[in-house]
Amino acid sequence: MNWAAISFDWNQVRAFLATAEEGSFSGAARALKTTQPTIGRQISELEERLGVTLFERSVRGPTLTEAGRDLLDHVRVMGEAATRISMSATAHSEDISGLVTVTATDLLSAQTLPGLLAPLRDSNPGVRVNIVASNDLQNLIQREADIAIRHVRPEQPDLIARHVGDFHAGLYASKAYLDRAGRPRTPRDVADHDFVGNPDPTRLIAPMHNLGIPLRPENFVMSSESGVVVWQLLRADLGLSVLPDALCDPDPSLERVLPELPPFQFPIWLVTHRELQTSKRIRVVFDLLVRGFREMGNLKRD
């Protein structure tokens, strides 16, 4: 079929592309921030317009037909072109107003970004900020975010990154927990305590072993993917955890365990797409974050 000769409704095309990439109507609805019935209706309308079946429907979910696979190659090219057009329009905008999306971990989003972004309301009140609190690496190339704050340097050549410093982190517990369970005097003593943290304990066990702390998976009594939840588990007197000094030191209910231990370090990278650096509103937010992180007294800088 000559797809180039057919006019398309872009909403229908986006629904088709998202379903093909997500593997389900529900996944496409989440990606496009709409409803599953809307996705199904748009794809059915596209199929009716084209006179072909694009997906086989079954209890296992939608499966691309041969016609669907053929169309997918063309639609991906259209999607890439649309993204480039959006980036170009944003890059050449002279208006310092509009929406900027910033993504960071939930802990950074809740505890650090509000203070860093507050001056924006006075300096550039026309700029609106959407904070995406996510521990996943958002795809800047597909414009899921304008600015990302990450702990690893991205490898994509279209992205630029600036290292603004390193968060120091240490081993902390609540004073109430330590009063009850006892304060470790040596690294070996730490292994006799409960821990809270990430659901994958191996991420902490290996560096602890390097410090002479023989942790085991059994030490971890509660866990969460959310850094904010882990912080609250710590404050609820449930055990020890590794968290940033900037978060724990100001909290009078928390205490650093074995402060002589070497600190853990988490690099802070500010990342944006190369083309978006010429967008004034995105540049304003990017530069504000750079200054804010570098002015933080508890952030180690190069």
Image (cartoon, rainbow, N blue to C red):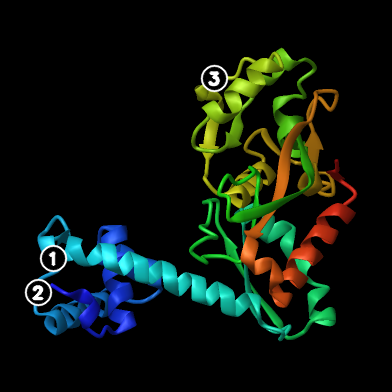
Between residue 290 and residue 37, name the one nearer to us. Answer: 290
Residues at circles 1 and 2 in contact by the CB criterion of under 8 Å: yes
State which tag comes first along the sequence, 1 or 2: 2
Give neighbour class at mark 3: few <14, some 14-19, many 20+ (Cα, 10 Å). some
Residue at point 78%, 29% (across, down): 257
Between residue 266 and residue 199, name the one nearer to us. Answer: 266
Amino acid type assigned to the residue bearing label 1 in the image: Ala
State which tag comes first along the sequence, 2 or 3: 2
Position of residue 144 measured from the top left corner of the image (x, y, whole percent): 51, 65
For residue 30, say whether it is visible: no
The residue that label 2 is drawn on is 52
Q: Which mark is residue 278?
A: none
Cα–Cα span, label 1 and label 2:
7 Å
Residue at point 67%, 33% (across, down): 240
Q: Which mark is residue 216?
A: 3
Left or right position of 131 against 144: right
Split into 4 quadrants, where in the image is the N terminus?
Answer: bottom left
Between residue 242 and residue 63, name the one nearer to us. Answer: 63
Q: Please say if 256 is above or below 144.
A: above
Position of residue 211 measured from the top left corner of the image (x, y, whole percent): 71, 17
Amino acid type assigned to the residue bearing label 3 in the image: Arg
Split into 4 quadrants, where in the image is the C terminus?
Answer: top right
In the rendered image, which quarter is residue 67 located in? bottom left
Q: Please say if 97 is above or below 185.
A: below
Position of residue 69 measured from the top left corner of the image (x, y, whole percent): 19, 60
Between residue 197 and residue 211, name the one nearer to us. Answer: 211
Give neighbour class at mark 2: few <14, some 14-19, many 20+ (Cα, 10 Å). some
For residue 246, say whether it is visible: yes
The residue that label 1 is drawn on is 67
What is the secondary structure assignment of the residue under circle 3? loop
Left or right position of 210 against 166: left
What is the secondary structure assignment of the residue under circle 2? loop
